[in-house]
Image (cartoon, rainbow, N blue to C red):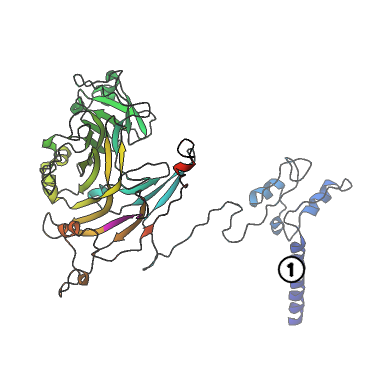
Amino acid sequence: MHRNYALRAAALLLVCASAQVAAQDEPLYSEPQLDSRVDASELEASQHRPDLDRAQLDDAPMSWEEYAASDDTPVETPGSEPGSEGGNYPRRTPTALPGDMEASASTPQHISLPDAEGSVQGMGESFSPVLSAGTGTYSVPIALPTGRAGVQPSLSLSYGTSGGNGPVGFGWHVGVPFISRQTDRGLPNYIDDTTTGLWQAEEDRFIYNGGQELVPVAESAANAFDDGYAPLEFAGWQQYRARIEGGFMRFYRAPDFRTWVVEGPDGSRLEFGALPDAQLPSDFGTLITGENRSGSALETEDGSGRGRIYRWFLTRMSDAHGSTVYYRYREDEGHRYLDDIHYVSPADCAAGGDWVAQRNCSQPLSRYGRRVVLQYESRQDVFESWVPGWRTAIGLRLARIAVTAAQGAPGARSMVRRYHLTYDAASFHSLLESVQVEGRPHAENMANEVIEQSETIPTENMLLSAGSTLLGPTLPAMRFGYSGVDRPSSASIPGFGG
């Protein structure tokens, strides 16, 4: 008996092995050849092979429709030729590529960096090509502490291949929203009707954030919003919208042309230009040195915040719950430079009740929990511009960005990190050469004496007075290189000695 079982098992293995060899010798596609001498029953029988067709494992025979429904293998529709639009023959798909490979010649290759301790990480920089214009942008974000309910500024160093000179050198700028008069069609005429505050045909066009043109909305159409009631605080204001709608934001311009308010669909609010003193923190208009900064968000002809206005910079950002972010600026030779940013208001501001009172809280900025300070240095390549219709000059360039956060007593802030910017010393032009991040220092880097604490964090005043002196450990600097065309000498130019 055991011998019979052994013979049967050997025979079964022999049959399976022969079937496997036959299957391996077959091509990936099962395409029987047509023969006019074979009838339909013989052809159907020849197409059912035990090694490829699992329908043979069932007790009852299957039709072609049942076969297609029971298997993932696609079946060709009736016709005369296999693989064409018709054909009574099943066509099997190729076997899948091994692993997770893709049948594409343009599959992007991604480099996976380790995420454990000590892993290599960048600053979050990114490059974005603008294919329609043949240009590109490169951005280095500034890491900032989290604000209340996620309300915090977004700050970055951005480079554009088509950008001009600015406070961060050629091609670079610090992205802060603004509204300006349109200049690509000629110099502004500054015909502003401050009597009615409404749009006039000869009025200048306005641009949001350097690219989006704003178009006025008729007064009758503006009053049709919100079931026929325009916001009460904007009574008499001129409303605008983007020419190409995408963000669904409403733009309101004050009758005196000194303030813009932009409302987003999520309840966010951006305020540009000058705001009433009653709506600002008590120390908003002064620097640490006591310099007056009222109207500093207005780029005007005389530089004092009065007269003809060319540009309105962002002054305050808030959400639907009254959490605010304040931006302050300094003026030098007619140009405005972002000076500092404050956010995370003190708890006393929440005692006002509604979100309007919280937004207009008068608590001083010195009690806000987060601050970002931008420090500048003089530059040799002073860049002049007459775009507004009068002279402005960029005589400063960004040297450091200091980030501080609340520490200890109310109103006290200490160092979080600093960003150091250096420029190419071999070039007369200000070309940003490197950006380096400095972290919180250890105790032994603070003084030569013994400190009992394991770590000492510099206060805000210590940090701002340190200048370029490093107080803590640093990451390797991110460096930049530039390509250009050699400038011909005047001797080779016709009419100039050539």
Q: Position of residue 303 (x, y in %)?
A: 20, 35
Under mark 1, the amino acid is Cys
Residue placed at 52% from the left, 56% from the top? 109
Q: Position of residue 415 (x, y in %)?
A: 21, 59
Task: Based on the picture, tell me whether residue 229 belongs to the magenta stretch.
Answer: no
State whether residue 50 is above or below residue 264. Answer: below
Report the front residue among 55 and 200.
200
Please tell me how many numbered marks the rendered image carries: 1
- The residue that label 1 is drawn on is 16
Mark 1: secondary structure: helix
The answer to whether residue 208 of the structure is visible from this angle is: yes
Residue placed at 25% from the left, 51% from the top? 377
Which residues are drawn in magenta?
418-428
Q: Is residue 130 left or right of residue 366?
A: right
Report the front residue among 121 and 137.
137
Residue placed at 24% from the left, 20% from the top? 198
Q: Is residue 264 left or right of residue 1?
A: left
